[in-house]
Image: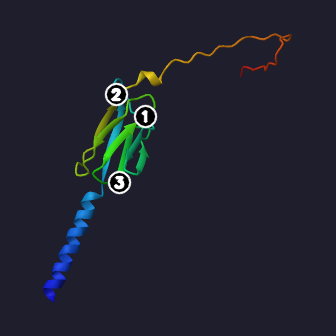
């Protein structure tokens, strides 16, 4: 009877250790590859988890499994990599700017007189 209890206890401890190893966290920082500046608000996805980077570019994902992590941000090319929760170092990701997202915007306006054939709105400078 004692062997049965010890065997059951060993199996439970092994299961707990195994579960703890698969539910680790991963930390990282997201930076611009050309300027080395942190990227605020980058979206980091791992499985069903979604987090964003803070103003320093830092992020943390808890309860990691061995899934693929995807990092994306407006104006940058997305990055994907296979996660390794056993790696406890802080990972650094450098996103490459994607100029197609950052096309220049030109604003044109006309000045209408009081006798214009269309309605107008006066904008005041403050």
**Residue at point 81%, 10% (across, down):** 113
> How far, Cα to Cα, is label 1 from label 2?
15 Å
Residue 66 x %, y %: 27, 51
Quadrant for the C terminus, please.
top right
Mark 1 surroundings within 10 Å by alpha-carbon count, few (fewer than 14), some (14 through 19), many (20 or more): many
Residue 51 located left or right of residue 3: right
Which label sits on residue 2? none
| Badge 3 or badge 2: first in the primary sequence | 2
| Badge 1 or badge 2: first in the primary sequence | 2
The residue nearer to you, when weighing 44 against 28, is 44
Residue 72 x %, y %: 40, 36
Give the structural element (helix, strand or loop) at label 3. Answer: strand
Quadrant for the N terminus, please.
bottom left
Give the structural element (helix, strand or loop) at label 2. Answer: loop
Which label sits on residue 36? 2
**Residue at point 36%, 32% (across, down):** 31
Residue 12 x %, y %: 23, 74
**Residue at point 46%, 31% (across, down):** 74
Which label sits on residue 73? 1
**Residue at point 16%, 81% (across, down):** 6
Quadrant of res 8 = bottom left
| Residue labelled with disc 3 | 62
| Badge 1 or badge 3: first in the primary sequence | 3
> How far, Cα to Cα, is label 1 from label 3?
21 Å
């Amino acid at each position: 009877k004692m062997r049965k209890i010890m065997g059951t206890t060993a199996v439970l401890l092994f299961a707990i250790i195994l579960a703890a190893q698969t539910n680790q966290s991963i930390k990282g920082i997201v930076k611009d590859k050309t300027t080395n500046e942190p990227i605020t608000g980058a979206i980091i996805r791992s499985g069903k988890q979604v987090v964003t980077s803070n103003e320093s570019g830092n992020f943390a994902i808890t309860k990691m499994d061995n899934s693929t992590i995807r990092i994306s941000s407006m104006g940058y090319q997305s990055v994907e990599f296979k996660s390794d929760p056993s790696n406890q170092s802080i990972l650094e990701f450098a996103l490459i700017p994607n100029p197609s997202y950052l096309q220049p915007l030109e604003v044109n306006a006309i000045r209408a007189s009081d006798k214009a054939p269309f309605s107008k709105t006066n904008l005041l400078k403050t």
